[in-house]
Image: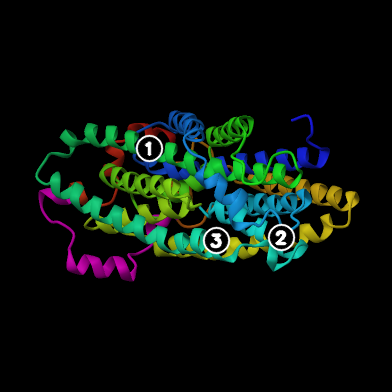
């Protein structure tokens, strides 16, 4: 590390800051449903997720190699300031969507930032278009549908297997299953998202001549990236946890177990194949699938629609911010300093805005209407067209099973810890 210049050091620190925001932005992916149903208390859930994210960071480097030698051509004249500008765009977008409580993709924010900065500073020759299509765009489109279908089928199967059983008899089993599946999602998240920061740092080291092209991330890079994402995860992205756990559908323990298991399977498979998948899209798709899979369940399509819009905007928005940052950074040392000062000012303003309507572990399970200044509670939204169509084919159950399957406060009867925090 003795040959690392000041600029590369700044890039490394900025990459770890992005990793930190990635951690608290994506805590909801693993723990929103577990916290929502009361299977684990909020603080215990984020602590477990943080530890497993750290462990997951050491399990694979395939995604890191996709970043450091895949979507960006490291031999096309990529300089450390280009990477710095890309990271700034990703961080700003992460914080904006966190403020709005939208579970957008940290991964796509990073890709968009790197692509936008590279296009401005180097041109189209610096971006490997085939890799972007095959390993970013196609997985981004397919992943929510695959995870949603898997969760829908798993939810239907789970309720069918438990049909006729007293809900209290199965509550402990579902609680244990949720904890195990949430742990698996956290581990999978570490194998996928922590590696993206490893890949960016390795790319910076390659552009600075510190390591050879196509090298695996050094051990100190793996350790620092794992620790950064674990710390961010432990702090908890409570706003997004609320949206994922309460805003999309009313999740009961069987649904939470099915959604998390399906999401973990998709994420681990993508990590093995080197696909830099959006874990946010996978987990959000799985939650929606679990809502459709339960008879009588309601998916709040207005919330889902906002999420999809954010997904579509993430790549171009992060690219636009990073492109502007790259234009400024290309002016020399004063430009890089200006980018850093502007980024700090924007991040500080976002943080100050978030303090006006705080969401934390004490009110994360409260309805949105209970939060200071919030609008109508999401539970007031009627069923959407898709939900209504599914219910016409598979009507909500009547009789003894209705209480177990119907959305509403009975899920809180199984979740005293959740009710206590709301």
Neighbours of disc 3 within 10 Å: few (<14), some (14-19), many (20+): some
The answer to whether residue 371 is seen in the rendering is no
The total number of labels drawn is 3
Is 45 above or below relative to 345? above
The boundaries of the magenta stretch are: 377-402
Left or right: 54 with respect to 393?
A: right
**Closer to the camera, 348 or 267?**
267
Left or right: 254 with respect to 75?
A: left
Between marks 1 and 3 in the image, the one whose residue lies nearer the viewer: 3
**Quarter the C terminus occupies:** top left
Q: Secondary structure at mark 1?
A: helix
Q: Residue at x 74, y 54 (%)?
A: 78
Residue that numbered label 2 is attached to = 118
Q: Residue at x 51, y 35 (%)?
A: 57
Q: Residue at x 42, y 56 (%)?
A: 378
Q: Quadrant of residue 167?
A: top left
Q: Secondary structure at mark 2?
A: helix
Q: Earlier in the sequence, mark 1 or mark 3?
A: 3
**Closer to the camera, 395 or 280?**
280
Residue that numbered label 3 is attached to = 131
Q: Earlier in the sequence, mark 3 or mark 2?
A: 2
Q: Secondary structure at mark 3?
A: helix
Q: What is the C-alpha distance between the residues marked 1 and 3?
A: 28 Å
Residue that numbered label 1 is attached to = 184
């Amino acid at each position: 590390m003795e040959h690392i210049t000041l600029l590369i050091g700044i890039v490394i620190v900025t990459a770890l800051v992005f990793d930190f925001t990635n951690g608290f932005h994506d805590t909801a992916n693993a723990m929103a449903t577990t916290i929502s149903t009361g299977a684990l208390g909020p603080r215990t859930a984020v602590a477990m997720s943080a530890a497993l994210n750290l462990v997951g960071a050491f399990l694979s480097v395939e995604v890191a190699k996709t970043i450091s030698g895949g979507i960006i051509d490291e031999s096309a004249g990529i300089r450390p300031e280009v990477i710095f500008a890309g990271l700034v765009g990703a961080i700003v977008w992460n914080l904006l969507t966190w403020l709005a409580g939208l579970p957008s993709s940290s991964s796509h924010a990073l890709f968009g930032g790197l692509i936008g900065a590279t296009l401005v500073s180097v041109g189209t020759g610096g971006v490997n278009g085939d890799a972007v299509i095959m390993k970013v765009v196609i997985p981004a489109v397919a992943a929510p549908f695959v995870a949603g279908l898997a969760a829908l089928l798993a939810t239907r199967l789970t309720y069918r297997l438990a049909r006729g059983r007293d809900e209290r008899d199965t509550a402990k089993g579902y609680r244990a299953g949720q904890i195990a599946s949430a742990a698996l999602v956290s581990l999978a998240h570490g194998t996928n998202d922590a590696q993206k920061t490893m890949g960016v740092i390795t790319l910076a080291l390659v552009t600075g001549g510190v390591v050879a092209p196509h090298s695996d991330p050094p051990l100190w890079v793996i350790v620092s990236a794992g620790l950064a994402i674990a710390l961010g995860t432990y702090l908890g992205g409570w706003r997004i946890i609320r949206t994922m756990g309460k805003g999309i559908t009313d999740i009961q323990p069987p649904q939470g177990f099915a959604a998390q298991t399906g999401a973990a399977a998709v994420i681990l498979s993508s990590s093995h194949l080197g696909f830099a998948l959006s874990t946010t899209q996978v987990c959000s798709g799985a939650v929606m699938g679990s809502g459709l899979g339960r008879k009588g369940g309601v998916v709040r399509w207005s919330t889902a629609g906002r999420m999809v819009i954010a997904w579509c905007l993430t790549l171009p928005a992060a690219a636009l911010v990073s492109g502007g940052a790259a234009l400024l950074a290309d002016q020399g040392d004063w430009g890089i300093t200006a980018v850093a000062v502007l980024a700090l000012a924007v991040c500080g303003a976002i943080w100050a805005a978030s303090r006006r309507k705080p969401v934390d572990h004490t009110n994360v399970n409260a309805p949105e209407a209970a939060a200071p200044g919030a609008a109508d509670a999401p539970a007031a939204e009627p069923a959407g067209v898709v939900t209504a169509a599914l219910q016409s084919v598979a009507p909500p159950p009547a009789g003894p099973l209705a209480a177990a399957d119907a959305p509403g406060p009975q899920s809180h009867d199984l979740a005293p810890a959740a009710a206590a925090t709301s």
